[in-house]
Image (spheres, coloured by chain):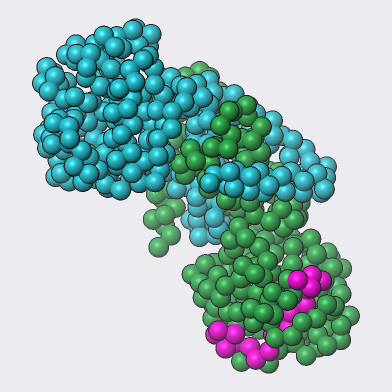
Chain colours: A green, B cyan
């Protein structure tokens, strides 16, 4: 059992982690740090954290592990700030959806001022903030760790924590993670955000009924498209490189099917669609 | 209670309708017509139909209502075929996802050789065929009718049937239906089919694990993208006009956000995403 863990930014992910750490008796005391008094209060009332702080200061020395659960654009700066107080045996981890977010300067401090274990628990809902947290958020989901340097012991400790709160853990390279996420998460979100806007700009009489008439497709899209805008602006920009590449490939494929539609190429469209179904079957079968 | 209703193409929708008609005691006897012996057998074993036929013939005269539940490309021809035997008091309805599918020649026969009530119950799963049918498929979903001509009594009868199997019924013009469906259903399906292919063409080591790492977004897409390829090729081609227009608008919006990403226009991206969230809230609130 860890004596003290700090969670910086105890929102949906951070506060759910706090709740899970307590439920599984992984930690005696949890510190929450947040600039938002309201969110901090919510996390405290929910008992996701035991102590509230507004700033990072020398008291952080007491925590053996620090989880950064803020939007991705803030993580690198927070690590730098932490390094003013931390020592090399203290583990810093994060939950960001993009992993190529650390400056060289920051990475150079690894193993000297702290032990950095970047992580990404693939869990969440379209709701945000501590008020929406729950302790089973991570169960049966995947967590990806993208270790840097040679701090195997720290990686093992962070891996064990995620496993104990119910996750399956995989490790991969930073670029591999960011590329995979660009297609499985970031591009679908970009599309979902966009298509809801497109729909609303359409000249339709019964606009307010759009969602009533949406079986599957659009309803899923509006749910995805209602995720936190700040968080997603950050993710899109931080993973700009891979997202742009993936988007370009997708647009090429869309142009291809658009052309086939124009030319009424029935059998070619059918073949494309059938292939998708086969791909899905392959993916799903290999899952086991 | 109707004496006899015929369901042509008792697949997922048709066989579920058969089951619901029986459960709600709307009809004494249900005839199923299908070229596929296997599907017809499944529908019969499931007791979605009471009698099996391979062809449309003069026996159709006994049915007061005929539901055509085949892929949309076949519907117009089937109506023509039916008109060899039907009389003007017999109601022909369908469940197609596109409504602008009838030739002028066919429409001219309306009120003379049959009473046509085009319909679209917005229900379904990614599975197809009678073997996946279930009697509660329609509950609490919307059904859109797009009446033509002046056969109000027939519209009322079809409307009542869908209501009795649990649906909310709306009527609108054919073009309005096809435009709305192009954004709420057809474009999302086109995108979902496409993006699964894009993902599989990506140069990723752990391709088989793509789906494990897909939180929300991609998983929904692969589910949508696994729908029946024949049915969807038909839908895309039959609603080509509106689908192309909607796709063009969507692509313009995507290009806009792509440009913003390239230029790292943080606040503009944030504003776009925030607007989507607001739109969703508007749509959802107005839903009540």
Does residue A187 show up?
no
Q: Which residue is rendered at x = 82% and y = 48% of the image?
A: B267
Q: Position of residue B46 (x, y in %)?
A: 17, 46
Does residue A86 show up?
yes
* Pick the front one: B8 or A131: A131
Q: Quadrant of residue A102?
A: bottom right
Left/right placement of residue B273 relative to residue B175 reads right
Q: Quadrant of residue B106?
A: top left
Q: Position of residue B107 (x, y in %)?
A: 35, 11
**B169 lies above or below A21:** above
**B113 lies above or below B51:** above
Which region shows up in magenta?
Answer: A22-38
Quarter holding the N terminus of chain B is: top left
* Pick the front one: B180 or B127: B180
Q: Position of residue B44 (x, y in %)?
A: 14, 40
* Pick the front one: A13 or B139: B139
Left/right placement of residue A69 relative to residue B143 reads right
Q: Which residue is rendered at x = 53% and y = 41% of the image?
A: A211
Left/right placement of residue B36 relative to residue A39 reads left
Q: Which residue is rendered at x = 74% and y = 67% of the image?
A: A70
Q: Is residue A114 magenta?
A: no
Q: Is residue A30 magenta?
A: yes
Q: Quadrant of residue B130?
A: top left
């Amino acid at each position: 059992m860890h004596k003290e863990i700090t969670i910086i930014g105890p929102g949906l992910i951070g506060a759910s982690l706090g709740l899970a750490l307590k439920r599984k008796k992984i930690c005696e005391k949890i510190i929450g740090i947040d600039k938002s008094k309201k969110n901090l209060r919510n996390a405290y009332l929910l008992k996701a954290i035991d102590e509230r702080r507004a700033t990072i200061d020398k008291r952080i020395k007491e925590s053996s592990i620090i989880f950064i659960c803020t939007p991705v654009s803030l993580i690198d700066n927070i690590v730098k700030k932490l390094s003013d107080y931390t020592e090399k045996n203290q583990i810093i981890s994060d939950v960001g959806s993009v992993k190529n977010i650390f400056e060289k300067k920051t990475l150079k401090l690894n193993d000297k001022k702290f032990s950095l274990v970047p992580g990404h628990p693939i869990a969440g809902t379209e709701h945000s903030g501590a008020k929406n947290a729950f302790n089973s958020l991570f169960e049966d989901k995947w967590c990806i760790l993208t270790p840097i340097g040679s701090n195997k012991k720290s990686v093992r400790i962070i891996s064990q924590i995620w496993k104990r709160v119910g996750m399956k853990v995989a490790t991969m390279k930073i670029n591999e993670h960011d590329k995979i996420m660009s297609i499985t998460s970031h591009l679908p979100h970009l599309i979902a955000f966009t298509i809801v806007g497109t729909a609303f700009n359409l000249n339709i009489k019964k606009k307010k009924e759009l969602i009533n008439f949406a079986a599957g497709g659009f309803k899923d899209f509006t749910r995805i498209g209602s995720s936190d805008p700040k968080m997603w602006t950050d993710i899109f920009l931080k993973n700009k490189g891979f997202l742009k590449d993936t988007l370009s490939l997708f647009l090429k494929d869309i142009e291809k099917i658009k052309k086939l539609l124009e030319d009424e190429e029935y059998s070619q469209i059918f073949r494309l669609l059938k292939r998708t179904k086969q791909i899905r079957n392959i993916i799903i079968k290999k899952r086991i």
